[in-house]
Amino acid sequence: MLLLWRTTSHRLNLFVFHFEIICLNKGKLNHRTMSRGVCISRTLRSWNCTMGYFGAHHYKWYHPPPPLQVGHKGLTVDLRSDTITKPTEGMKKAMMEALLGDDVYREDPTVTELERRMSELAGKEAALFVPSGTMGNLVSVLGHCEQRGSEALLGDQAHIFLYEQAGMAQLGGVQPHIIPTRADGTFDSQEIYDRMRDEDVHCPRSALVCIENTHNVCGGKVLPCHWIDEVGSVAHSLGLPLHMDGARLLNAVIASGISADRILQACDSASVCFSKGLGTPVGSVIVGTEEFIQKALRLRKVLGGGMRQAGMLAAAAIYSLDNMVNRLADDHRNAFVLAQAICDTESTNVTCVPEDVHTNIVIVNLRSGSISPEEFCARLALVSEEEAKTLGEEIVIKILPWTATSVRFVTHHDVLCDGIQATVAKLKYVIKEIDSQRK
Amino acid sequence: MSSQVNGYEGCRVVDMRSDTFTLPSQGMKEAMMAAPLGDDVFQEDPTVIELQNKMATLLEKEAALFVPTGTMGNLICVLNHCRSRGSEVILGNLSHVHIYEQGGISQLGGVHPRTLQNLPDGTFSLEELRKAVRKDDVHMPITELVCIENTHNVAGGRVLPLEWLDQLGSTCRELGLPLHMDGARLMNAAAAMQVPPARIVRDCASVSVCLSKGLGAPVGSVIVGSQEFITKARRLRKVLGGGMRQAGIIAAAGIYALDHVAPTLQRDHAHIKAIAQAVSDLGSKAIFVNLEGVHTNILMLECDLNVLSPTQLCERMGQITDEETERHR
């Protein structure tokens, strides 16, 4: 159970405590506590308290309906991330039948096969299987930034910068130097020149440029190929290698129709996830030169990523390369359908730009002052009686709050066609409900 | 396993390089395929949770965390205990953490190792330990942890004596230092001593146990400790890149291993003892074995360097000669 307590302070020296209780219990809401919370909010409002400053996450204009206890026939559509994808039966069969060995001794034939396949796909000399994208990126950054006092240039919205627990600094002593990211996931390549360090005892040494494709925070955007080439050219002219966080690279490949090796042409290394849209349970692969991968092998070991019979996991990845890549187009189509449905409601409170949906991620904006991301997520996760009657079924949608004014939907292979239809139906209902409260 | 070795077809290969080479059994694989899964970064994988609970209960600790390797298990534990800038850990000079983990605790965590001379039985002197503890002095790092290893790999798979463990435990308590056990082969120790593993780790604040060695799982280790320790350990696991997704598929192998393979470890010990006995019976002047030192599933053979080197012995064992095959017929 997750309880969120907020307070707002009254502008007129009246200290008003406004409790809003949001309970999330596996998509089911506790009717008692939820309605208690709603009662308290309504009571406080009836006291005619003037609400002064509100924290970024709570506007109090939106009143969710009392929730229904969702029965076992309820449909849950989990759009929080493509990391939740489970292995298919075919994938599991491949895992069971895989030939195995000890990968620390580099004797696992299935891991070797996956690495060979990936290096070929990426047009690089060699590859290395790692337990996660975080480790893939960390190994790559530390592999490139070997000298004490190194600095890595990357976008200020990069996953490596925001969501990898500052690993490069925490563990590797590498300083990140951020560049403002544009809405399309790129940055001005001129900024690389501006940020390139001089050889000066005051300065760290620029050692690496990092980019991310598709760009997560910017909404799954596909980086333009010509831009990647341009950044590569600038970086190389300055003697800097280029690393791509390609967690969702295959999504970029399918969306753009451009091959992985072409996309990565200017990149010296890349980290590609298999546990996201490709659906494997665990793992990523990094690619690069033979020399780079030899360094990466040592880094992987010291970080604790030297797994033994990892071929079982690699087998899932090989299966996904053969069976799960082309279907990413379905995820992209489903994302577009959701975006279009939101746009079609013509709501001014909940908005989305379908043209901005390149792949399987949809960022939905919430008008400031209407409903907060947390409230919107909570509402989608609860089912009201009226809603169940109108829609004819109990639908629970799980998504994640994204920024102070947006939420994120991610489509993937565990969301079936009827899941998307149900999501559309529920979204339309909820948006209408919000609009009716907040004109 | 049959293959071609230096010209001989249909050879039998017996791989005793390590217990890390163990392959998952059919039963283990079936358990893996049937396991319910979820995203373990969101802490929603029920099989990972089940394995963690099982391990915590087995070792009588509050909580546990599944990690991809023993190296990561040890690294997380050391970094988790040694939080101050300038911290130091006291450990044996022949410990796996010191010799075979690439200096990770220093390389990645800035932790200083203070080694004590390991005695042949895998222990070290408690007097030396007391002397090694740092004083509060601006010249000195800060002692924050003591590490031990059980069974002790380099010492030949020896089981640490319980009395020594108990004395060490009380010494650490007195010194206000936590005790971490690299229990990669803890289950071998428990099997050899016929003592519950929880008794062995009673005084340890944290333990790292491997599932991928003698227990036969393809991947993974588990660390145990207090609830607070494990909550913090989760963050360290994430930053190191150990946050796996549907990790339940490999955790299931760990559960199977604890239920079905752990009870059979004594068989591995019996096998090693048989080999050790056979070598001893030969009374060779070139290759020696210390029978007393064979406790678990590791056998160390000493070579007289005037006759042959360890490398030569390994090479010879990996070859087949005509004379040898003649004798067999």
Image (cartoon, grey):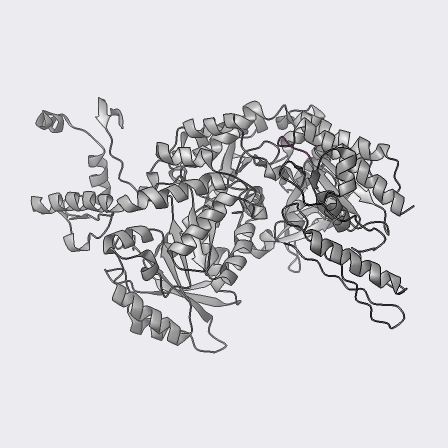
Q: Position of residue B305 (x, y in %)?
A: 17, 48
Between A372 and B67, the residue placed more toward the observer is A372
Magenta run includes residue A412: yes
Q: Position of residue A53 (x, y in %)?
A: 85, 62
Image quarter in which the N terminus of chain B is found: top left
- Residue B212 visible in this rendered orientation of the protein: yes
Between B287 and B263, the residue placed more toward the observer is B263
Q: Is residue A97 left or right of residue A241?
A: left
- Residue A98 visible in this rendered orientation of the protein: no
Magenta run includes residue A307: no
Between B183 and A297, the residue placed more toward the observer is B183
Image quarter in which the C terminus of chain B is found: top left
Above or below for A52 versus A78: below
Residue A99 position by quadrant: top left
The residue positioned 59% from the left and 26% from the top of the image is A324
Q: Is residue A262 left or right of residue A335?
A: left
Number of numbered discs visible in the structure rendering: 0
Predominant SS along the magenta part: loop
Above or below for B139 versus A218: below
The residue positioned 48% from the left and 43% from the top of the image is B47
Q: Is residue A249 left or right of residue B274?
A: right
Residue A110 position by quadrant: top left
Q: Position of residue B164 (x, y in %)?
A: 27, 67
Above or below for B26 versus B300: above
Q: Position of residue B273 (x, y in %)?
A: 17, 46
Please identify the residue farthest to the right as the structure is shown: A439
Q: Which residues are magenta?
A: A411-415
The residue positioned 47% from the left and 64% from the top of the image is B81
Above or below for B297 versus B107: above
